[in-house]
Image: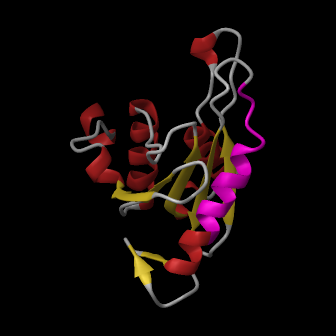
Amino acid sequence: MSGSHERGGVPVADEAALIAAARAAAADAYAPYSRFPVGAAVLLRDGRIMRGVNVENASYGLSLCAETVAIAVAAAAGRMADIVAIAVAGGTGEEPLTPCGRCRQVIAEAASVGGSEVAVICATPDGGTIARFSSSSLLPHAFGAAALG
């Protein structure tokens, strides 16, 4: 990762690039039903960024969230253990968009696989307002592999 100044464990330059990638991804979201485009981007240990978008379906329950898609893209590349941060941007509100419960669980799994917290950076559609969390603060007491016995 680049830069020496950090916010929540993520270098400022990397955070800015990650938010920009999430915002750019939101423009590619497939959201014809809700008109609620969301983009996400994961930052890997080596500085690489992978993007995801929400993908809606006429059968609403089959829709995919941007955060889950971004993590799946990293997993498909064999890089899930390398995720150090995820940014999510989009929606239509004036408050930063935070991951839904399902996405919080998926982020917690990525943190577990990587063996460390994942920084979660949430932004408004214009990137003007940002909120920062750790994966465990968004989902304390997450269900995990240890619960499976």
Where on the picture, by quarter, is residue 7?
Answer: bottom left
| Residue at image point 64% right, 70% down | 17
Indicate whether 98 appears above or below 101.
below
> Quarter of the image containing the N terminus?
bottom right
Res. 149 visible in picture: no
Q: Nearer the viewer, residue 138 or 45?
A: 138
Q: Can you say which quadrant of the picture contains the C terminus?
A: top left
Q: Which residues are magenta?
A: 17-31
Whether 61 is drawn above or below 6: the answer is: above
Membership of 20 in magenta stretch: yes
Q: Residue 138 appears at what percent x and percent y?
A: 31, 46
Q: Is residue 21 magenta?
A: yes
> Residue drawn 46% across and 48% down?
96
Q: Total of numbered circles in the picture?
A: 0
- Residue at 48%, 91% (x, y): give it: 4
Q: Residue furthest left?
A: 141
Render colour scheme: secondary structure
Extreme residue in the top direction = 59
Q: Residue furthest bottom?
A: 4
- In the image, 99 versus 71, the foreground residue is 99
The location of residue 57, given as percent across then percent down, is: 70, 17
Left or right, 66 with respect to 98, comes to right
Residue 28 in view in this figure = yes
**Residue lying furthest right:** 28
Q: Which of 9 and 122 lies nearest the eye of the viewer?
A: 122
* Residue 24 image offset from top left, x and y in percent: 73, 53
Residue 102 drawn at (x, y percent): 43, 31
Where residue 79 sits, quadrant-wise, is bottom right
**In the image: residue 123, left or right of residue 38:** left
Magenta stretch secondary structure, dominant: helix
